Amino acid sequence: MIGLTHFFDNEFAGSAHGARKGGLTEKGRELVRRMQERGVLVDLAHVSPAAVEDVLAMATKPTVVSHGGVAGTCANARTLSDAQVRGIAAGGGVIGIGYWETAICGREPRHVVAAMRYVIGLVGDDHVGLGSDFDGATTVGFDTSQLAALTQQMLAEGLSEDSIRKILGGNVVRVLRAVLPER
């Protein structure tokens, strides 16, 4: 999996945090083509809205947002619009919902689940995953040792066991199988 940008615009694409926030460059288009030919996942986390649109217009395999949020529950420059969520889902992709303030406007399991439920209501439970971003730079209200608390919150809010299995890893496994080269 390769993310096309991080905090700055670069020679491949505009960043959601960048100065220009442009779409894919010609080098970026070539990179995405080559990634998809070789079975490398395209990660749309941190890319600008224009770059998301450009990737989705040319993608032939599912894409992912490894960690982020949705504007429907927490609107800011880093979260996905409804149209972007629909585009990722239409291609069979998965959106990993993050656990930190900028992604979900909170730090508790209930905030994570609210964003998950929003995506489920928009495109179904096949397109939601975990997007913790436990990289040491984010401040979260719980760590992976407390994943049971997030699972319990999903149960408390009425998500089915089947949906929870998909969210806890089944959806990501499906995308990996669809994108990675066969052995």
Image (cartoon, rainbow, N blue to C red):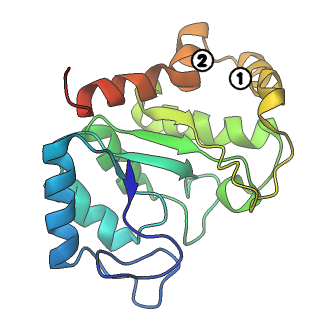
Quadrant where the C terminus is found in the figure:
top left
Name the residue nearer the viewer: 58 or 118: 58
Checking the image for residue 100, the label placed there is: none
46 is higher (above) or lower (below) than 15: above
Secondary structure of the residue carrying numbered label 2: helix
Q: Local crowd at mark 1 within 10 Å, few (<14), some, or many (≥20)?
A: many
Picture quadrant where residue 137 is located: bottom right
Name the residue nearer the viewer: 47 or 115: 47
Residue 156 in picture, x, y percent from top left: 78, 18
**1 and 2 marks in contact (CB < 8 Å):** yes
* Residue 90 appears left or right of 104: left
Residue 80 in picture, x, y percent from top left: 48, 58
Q: Which residue is found at the position 14% from the left and 66% from the top?
A: 30
- Label 1 – label 2 distance at C-alpha: 7 Å
Q: Which residue is found at the position 18% from the left and 47% from the top?
A: 36
Residue 101 in picture, x, y percent from top left: 76, 58
**Which residue corresponds to mark 2?**
164
